[in-house]
Image (cartoon, rainbow, N blue to C red):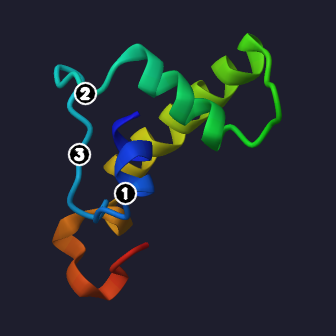
Amino acid sequence: YQYLSRYKRKKDLDHFLFIPERTEGTEKECLKLLLEFCGRHNPSWTELSNFTHFLNFQLSKCEKSVFCSPAVGADFQGF
């Protein structure tokens, strides 16, 4: 939710890191955003679950990647 909400508001994601303890938004806002970005019209709970697991996996890998690290600087900005 934290990434998707920032992405929707066109915020810079290059220096953002997910913090599990940080609670943002409500359950209703989260579900609305997931439905918007899922890519399916009227998805099932299984499809939403698969989408969130896949997105979480990809974002976790991205946070750990040296190519996506803020330390890389302007060479890979927006990557």
Calculate the distance from the C-alpha at mark 2 to the C-alpha at mark 1: 14 Å
Which numbered mark, 3 or 2, is in the foreground of this view? Answer: 2
Q: Where is residue 44 in the image (x, y as percent from the top left)?
A: 79, 16
Calculate the distance from the C-alpha at mark 1 to the C-alpha at mark 3: 16 Å
Q: What residue type is labelled 1?
A: Arg
Element carrying mark 2: loop
Which image quadrant: the N terminus? Answer: top left
> On screen, 53 above or below 74?
above
Q: Mark 3 points at which residue?
A: 17
Q: Are marks 1 and 3 in contact (CB under 8 Å)?
A: no
Q: Which mark is residue 69?
A: none
> On screen, 77 above or below 12?
below
Element carrying mark 3: loop
Calculate the distance from the C-alpha at mark 3 to the C-alpha at mark 2: 14 Å
Q: Which residue is drawn at 62% across and 43% down?
A: 37
Q: Mark 2 points at which residue?
A: 24
Binning the other alpha carbons within 10 Å of mark 2 as few (below 14), some (14 to 19) or many (20 upward) gives few
Q: Name the residue under label 1.
A: 9
Residues 16 and 66: in front is 16
Q: Residue at x 41, y 15 (%)?
A: 27
Is 58 positioned to the left or the right of 75 in the image?
A: right
Binning the other alpha carbons within 10 Å of mark 3 as few (below 14), some (14 to 19) or many (20 upward) gives few
Q: Which amino acid does label 2 sit on?
A: Glu
Query: Which is more N-terminal, label 1 or label 2?
Result: 1
> On screen, 12 above or below 6?
below
Query: Which is more N-terminal, label 3 or label 1?
Result: 1
Q: Position of residue 41 (x, y in %)?
A: 83, 34
Q: Which amino acid does label 3 sit on?
A: Leu
Q: Residue at x 33, y 80 (%)?
A: 77
Q: Position of residue 34 (x, y in %)?
A: 57, 32
Quadrant in the rendering for residue 17: top left
